Image: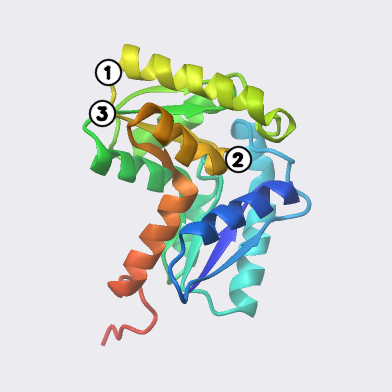
Amino acid sequence: MKILVINPNSTASMTELIGEEARSVATGGTDIVAVNPVNSPPAIQGPADGKAALPHLMEVFDHELATADFDAVIVACFDDTGLWQLKARAAIPVIGIGEAGFHAAMLAGERFSVVTTLPVSVPVIEQNIADQGMSTRCVKVRATEIPVLGLEIDPDGSVARISQEIEAALIEDKCNAIVLGCAGMADISGALQAKFEVPIIDGVKIAVGFCETLHKARVFSRAVSTA
């Protein structure tokens, strides 16, 4: 199968990281194409950035689906920017990494918390969780005060701060799964899971698995006749 991964922000280095992490879990025969708009904000941090990115995200989505035959699309922003608008425009599965992370957390544990970047993103994430009917399973959305691009600028310091927040979540929230609330955290989930020995969920890799499963099950498949 062929999966289109769209990073809604314009930071190409983050798109490269996202693509690498997506490919690291893809099964044989799955092709990952990772792209981003060029005119979006460099990071999606809160509703204003999401609104600014939306028309550019739509443009890339329409262009890519018009020029190549994809079987699924992943929106690689934890705010799930434009997710429901894109779902309405496609006959194939469109999955947000926030959406994927929440679902995986509910499969992995009874209660989960989210560890994200800046406080400005917390209301957006909380609303997404509520809109998807998951509020009773999510204990708390926690901000680390790390800007999205700070994950690249100071990776060691970022991991240390994220680790502190995970430790606090496990003690104070009494949750048994953690969802990493930024696509830029995709490359640290494995190390954090080994450290804390609880499910540390990255929505990028989970979304790839969900896309592959839906494709294998022929859910929304263009190969399935509706006659």
Q: What secondary structure is found at the residue carrying circle 3?
A: loop
**Disc 2 from disc 3: Cα separation:** 24 Å
Task: Identify which residue is drawn at 60% across, 51% down.
Answer: 18
Q: Of callouts 3 and 1, which one flags the residue occurring earlier in the amino acid sequence?
A: 3
Which label belongs to residue 105? none
| Screen quadrant of the C terminus | bottom left
Residue extending farthest left: 110
Residue 96: x and y in percent read 46, 50
Residue type, numbered disc 1: Lys
Residue type, numbered disc 3: Arg
Identify the residue position indicated by label 2 in the image.
Answer: 184
Identify the residue position indicated by label 3 in the image.
Answer: 111
Task: Say whether residue 10 is visible.
Answer: no
| Mark 1 burial class by Cα count in 10 Å: few <14, some 14-19, many 20+ | few
Q: What secondary structure is found at the residue carrying circle 1?
A: loop
Q: Is residue 19 above or below residue 169?
A: below
- Nearer the observer, 71 or 180: 180
**Disc 1 from disc 2: Cα separation:** 25 Å
Which label belongs to residue 174? 1
- Nearer the observer, 167 or 142: 167
The answer to whether the residues at label 1 and label 2 have Cβ atoms under 8 Å apart is no
